Amino acid sequence: MIFKNLLESFGQINDPRQRCKTEHLLGDILAISVCAVLAGAESYEDIADYGHCKHDWLHQFLTLPNGIPSHDTFRRVFMLIDAN
């Protein structure tokens, strides 16, 4: 229930990416990142590795239309998100 609320709250974050250039859903990227950091990830590479290792579990509640994003995708998205 708490995780579902977290996923829903991601919908309130403005996606700064150009729609035609996105392969991964913003909510999926954020959810993988939160889970990975809670599991000890310290870099974008760690987040991507976590996503690949936990793909089957993550796919139970995330869409993942193009699989797990690369570490470069995680980095680019977080560079674009306005933290204010």
Image (cartoon, rainbow, N blue to C red):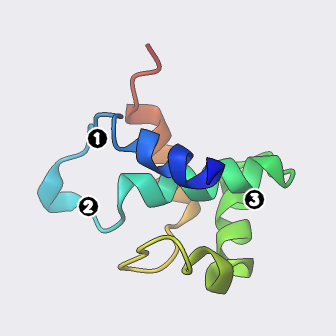
Residue type marked 1: Asp
How would you rate the neighbour count of disc 1 (Cα within 10 Å): few for under 14, some for 14-19, many for 20 or more?
some
The residue at which mark 3 appears reads as 46
- Find out whether the residues at labels 2 and 1 contact each other: C-beta distance under 8 Å: yes
How would you rate the neighbour count of disc 3 (Cα within 10 Å): few for under 14, some for 14-19, many for 20 or more?
some
Q: Earlier in the sequence, mark 2 or mark 1?
A: 1
84, above or below 44, in the image: above
Q: Which mark is residue 15?
A: 1
The residue at which mark 2 appears reads as 22
Residue reaching furthest to the bottom: 56
Looking at the picture, tell me which residue is in the foreground, 72 or 35.
35
- Find out whether the residues at labels 3 and 1 contact each other: C-beta distance under 8 Å: no
Name the residue: 65% across, 70% down.
Answer: 51
Secondary-structure class at tag 3: helix
Name the residue: 25% across, 45% down.
Answer: 17
Residue type marked 3: Asp
In the rendered image, residue 79, in percent from the top left (x then y), is placed at: 46, 34
Looking at the picture, tell me which residue is in the foreground, 42 or 11.
11
Q: Earlier in the sequence, mark 2 or mark 3?
A: 2
14 relative position to 83: left or right: left
In the rendered image, residue 69, in percent from the top left (x then y), is placed at: 49, 67
64 relative position to 33: left or right: left
- Estimate the spatial distance between the alpha carbons at disc 3 and disc 1, rounded to whole Å: 23 Å
- Estimate the spatial distance between the alpha carbons at disc 2 and disc 1, rounded to whole Å: 10 Å
Secondary-structure class at tag 1: loop
48, above or below 79, in the image: below
Quadrant of image for the N terminus:
bottom right
Quadrant of image for the C terminus:
top left
Residue type marked 2: Thr
Secondary-structure class at tag 2: loop
**Tag count:** 3
Looking at the picture, tell me which residue is in the foreground, 63 or 78.
63
